[in-house]
Image (spheres, rainbow, N blue to C red):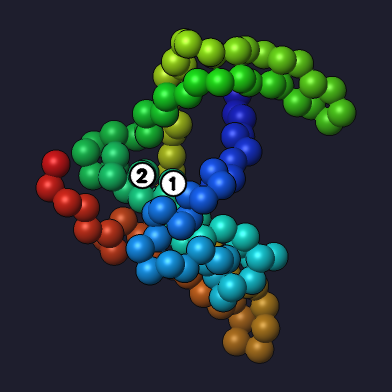
């Protein structure tokens, strides 16, 4: 089965992670295209590229806290990890390692405003 994790930056996270001080929307400053700063927007692509370079096909995630299963208007508290840490590998494909955010259409056809692949990222030595 598949699932998604709704996520957003912790309050003040952009201020701490972007040394340039740019904490607004990443793509053209448009909240409707991408409401998050560039560090948060690109984090999963960078993580996927990091683990792909090491021969892995998933990102190891650890989680603690509460989990709730939501289907339409129905909710079921599924787990309280509290002191327990859940280890959940997140698989990825080229859809994640080839990052593209943009707008379709317009006079020139498809226009991407932010695009990069793993080859564009330089990681420090392990």
Q: Few, some or many C-alpha atoms within 10 Å of disc 1 (few <14, some 14-19, many ≥20)?
A: some
Q: Is residue 93 left or right of residue 55?
A: right
Query: Which quadrant of the structure image shows residue 66?
Result: top right
| Residue 47 marker | 2
* Residue 1 position (above or below residue 112): above
Q: Is residue 114 left or right of residue 57?
A: right
* Residue 1 position (above or below residue 4): above
Spot the residue most to the left. 125
User: Residue 35, how many percent across, how many down?
Assistant: 62, 60
* Residue 64 position (above or below residue 6): above
Q: Residue at x 55, y 70 (%)?
A: 27
Spot the residue most to the bottom. 107
**Which residue in the structure is indicated by mark 1?**
44
Whether residue 112 can be seen here: no
User: Residue 45, how many percent across, how many down?
Assistant: 41, 50
Q: Residue at x 14, y 41 (%)?
A: 126
């Amino acid at each position: 089965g598949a699932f998604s994790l709704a996520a957003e930056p912790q309050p003040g996270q952009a201020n701490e992670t972007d040394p340039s001080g740019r904490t607004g929307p990443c793509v053209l400053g448009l909240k409707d295209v991408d409401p998050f700063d560039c560090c948060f927007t690109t984090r999963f692509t960078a993580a996927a590229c990091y683990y792909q370079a090491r021969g892995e096909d998933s990102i190891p995630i650890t989680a603690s806290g509460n989990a709730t299963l939501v289907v339409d208007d129905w909710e079921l508290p599924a787990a309280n990890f509290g002191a327990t840490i859940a280890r959940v590998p997140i698989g990825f494909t080229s859809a994640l390692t080839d990052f593209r955010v943009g707008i379709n259409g317009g006079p020139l056809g498809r226009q991407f405003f932010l695009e990069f692949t793993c080859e564009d990222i330089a990681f420090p030595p392990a």
